[in-house]
Image (cartoon, rainbow, N blue to C red):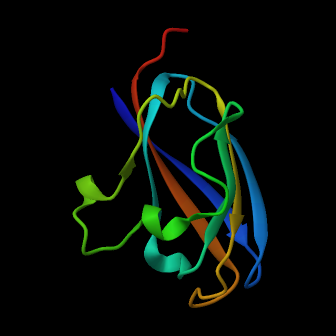
Amino acid sequence: MKKIQLIEKEIPVAGATVKINEELDRDYAEMTGIAFLDNIGLNCLLNSSSIDGEEVFPKNFEVAFLQSNVFVPPNERFFSLQDKKAGGNKIELEFKDGSTAASYPYTLKIYIRLEGEAKN
């Protein structure tokens, strides 16, 4: 069982920092990947990232490692993760815009790949 969960957040101005607190789908056991598209520009950071309080990426992680574009086949666009429990856990991200997007405001879209049936 697989699903893509979309998280959206408006980035109002260049250089903005926004906090994202979202519950991962309860019906899926694991978060197995994450992707950001390249329309957000460069130099963006994840100041912090955690699932249920456990750090996912180190502080000030460069989002460029998680970005893809239309030249990457769709089934290869995700940065793969292991041992990240979903099942209704909360994902918390603090995103810092890199001030290089084509226009502002824009909608940040984060794609989360979820797999496995949760045992509720």
Q: Is residue 48 left or right of residue 118?
A: right
In the image as oriented, which residue stretches furthest toward the front? 58
Q: Height in image: 6 above or below 106?
A: above
Q: Height in image: 37 above or below 82?
A: below
Quarter of the figure that contains the C terminus: top right
Q: Is residue 40 left or right of residue 113?
A: right
Q: Is residue 70 left or right of residue 58?
A: left
Front-lying residue, 110 or 58: 58
Number of marks in the image?
0
Q: Height in image: 74 above or below 4?
A: below
In the image as oriented, which residue stretches furthest toward the top? 120
Q: Position of residue 15 (x, y in %)?
A: 74, 81
Q: Position of residue 106 (x, y in %)?
A: 64, 77
Which residue is at 60% across, 88% downward? 100
Q: Position of residue 115 (x, y in %)?
A: 38, 30
Which residue is at 33% across, 26% downward? 1
Specify the quadrant of the image occupied by residue 9. bottom right
Which residue is at 53% across, 82% downward? 41
Q: Is residue 49 left or right of residue 76?
A: right
Front-lying residue, 45 or 58: 58
Which residue is at 47% across, 25% downward? 28
Q: Position of residue 40 (x, y in %)?
A: 55, 77
